Image (cartoon, rainbow, N blue to C red):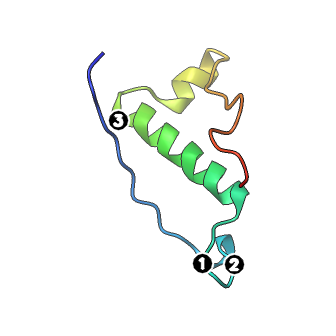
Amino acid sequence: MTDRQFAVRVAVRGYGADAQGHLNQAVHLQYAEHARWALLDAAGVRQADLLARGVGPVVPTAPWRPG
């Protein structure tokens, strides 16, 4: 397996953060979802093609736990 990285810039909107600048947990999932679709798009995998076949990525569990 090769070591690869993929990055996506995301604009943090005021409604996604509290007064201290902490992101809402649901916003973290939205950012992860955005990055995942961006990665698939960069790899040439189109969402419309997946949906036409009745398949798509899922999030079985969140990769972090509340502290």
Q: Position of residue 9 (x, y in %)?
A: 39, 59
Q: Residues within 10 Å of mark 2 (few under 14, many from 20)?
A: few
Residue beneath the point at 56% across and 46% down? 32
Q: Amino acid at mark 2?
A: Asp
Q: Residue furthest front?
A: 67
Q: Which residue is mark 2?
A: 18
Q: Residues within 10 Å of mark 1 (few under 14, many from 20)?
A: few
Q: Earlier in the sequence, mark 1 or mark 3?
A: 1
Q: Kindly state the secondary structure of the residue where label 1 is placed.
A: loop
Residue beneath the point at 61% across and 20% down? 52
Q: Which residue is mark 1?
A: 21
| Distance from the alpha carbon under mark 2 to that under mark 3 | 32 Å
Residue beneath the point at 53% across and 23% down? 49
Q: 51 left or right of 12? A: right
Marker disc for residue 1: none
Q: Which of the pair 35/18 is nearer the observer?
A: 18
> Which quadrant holds residue 43?
top left
Marker disc for residue 42: 3
Query: CB of mark 2 within 8 Å of CB of mark 3?
Result: no
Q: Is residue 63 above or below residue 49?
A: below
Of marks 1 and 3, the one in the foreground: 1
Q: 1 left or right of 12? A: left
| Quadrant (top left/top right/bottom left/bottom right) for the C terminus | bottom right
| Quadrant (top left/top right/bottom left/bottom right) for the N terminus | top left
Q: 23 left or right of 49? A: right
Q: Position of residue 46 (x, y in %)?
A: 47, 29
Q: Residues within 10 Å of mark 3 (few under 14, many from 20)?
A: few
Q: Position of residue 20 (x, y in %)?
A: 63, 82
Q: Amino acid at mark 1?
A: Gly
